[in-house]
Image (tube, rainbow, N blue to C red):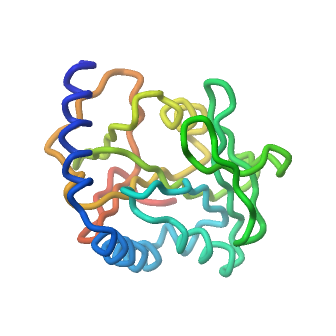
Amino acid sequence: MNSAKAELRTHVNATLRALSSEDISRRSSEIHKRLFATTFWREAKSIYCFVSLSREVQTAEIRSTSLSHGKLLALPRVVGDELQFHVVERDDQPLERSSLGIYEPPQELPHAEPSEHAPVLVVVPGIAFDPSCYRLGRGRGYYDRFLGRYRSSLFALGVCFEEQLVEAVPRDDRDVRLDAVLTEQRVLYRRRFS
């Protein structure tokens, strides 16, 4: 299982490295338009969103639009083996670069609790996704543990480029299934927002 996941990560990462920054920006904009037209975006009171790396769907516009539409915005921070989300109230909130190379909110910002901010839309990153809404992450399990713990309080949406969709993601019983996956061309649902 681990070797199959590692092989798929290598393959998809090579594909993503071939995309130009202009292509990533253009496709990210298409994803934003598609996202902002969905029911789950309109009805969510809170958006829990990752801070994108250079070869991921860019999330700055998702974050700024969340704030401008009066939605609660929370960003993730790794604490030990867990993922915690913190409330961000300003688009220009300074972020801190972690030892993993990702930007995180300062730990002194208020902790976000999904059960208190429903309905919550969690925008989830990943390396690869499949039509059954399973995802392959970077291998540390942070999102799987978070989503598993708060499953009943949120709607989990994977965002990716079409090249990141594969026939089937290798998975085991620790991998948590998402509710939907959105690309620049389509939305794949496992369940509808409610």
Residue 176 found in image quarter: top left
Relative vertical location of residue 166 with respect to residue 186 in this rendering, above or below: above
Q: Is residue 10 left or right of residue 150?
A: left
Residue farthest to the left, as pictured: 167
The location of residue 179, given as percent across then percent down, is 40, 50
Q: Residue at x 70, y 72 (%)?
A: 91
The location of residue 137, given as percent across then percent down, is 38, 37
The location of residue 64, given as percent across then percent down, is 62, 74
Front one among 117 and 60: 60
Q: Residue at x 66, y 62 (%)?
A: 46
Position of the N terminus, as image quadrant, is top left
Q: Is residue 163 left or right of residue 107?
A: left
Relative vertical location of residue 26 with respect to residue 93 in this rendering, above or below: below
Q: Is residue 54 left or right of residue 107?
A: left
Q: Is residue 15 left or right of residue 175?
A: left
Q: Residue at x 40, y 80 (%)?
A: 33
Q: How many marks?
A: 0
The location of residue 94, given as percent across then percent down, is 74, 61
Relative vertical location of residue 31 with respect to residue 50 in this rendering, above or below: below
Relative vertical location of residue 173 with respect to residue 170 in this rendering, above or below: above
Q: Residue at x 33, y 41 (%)?
A: 135
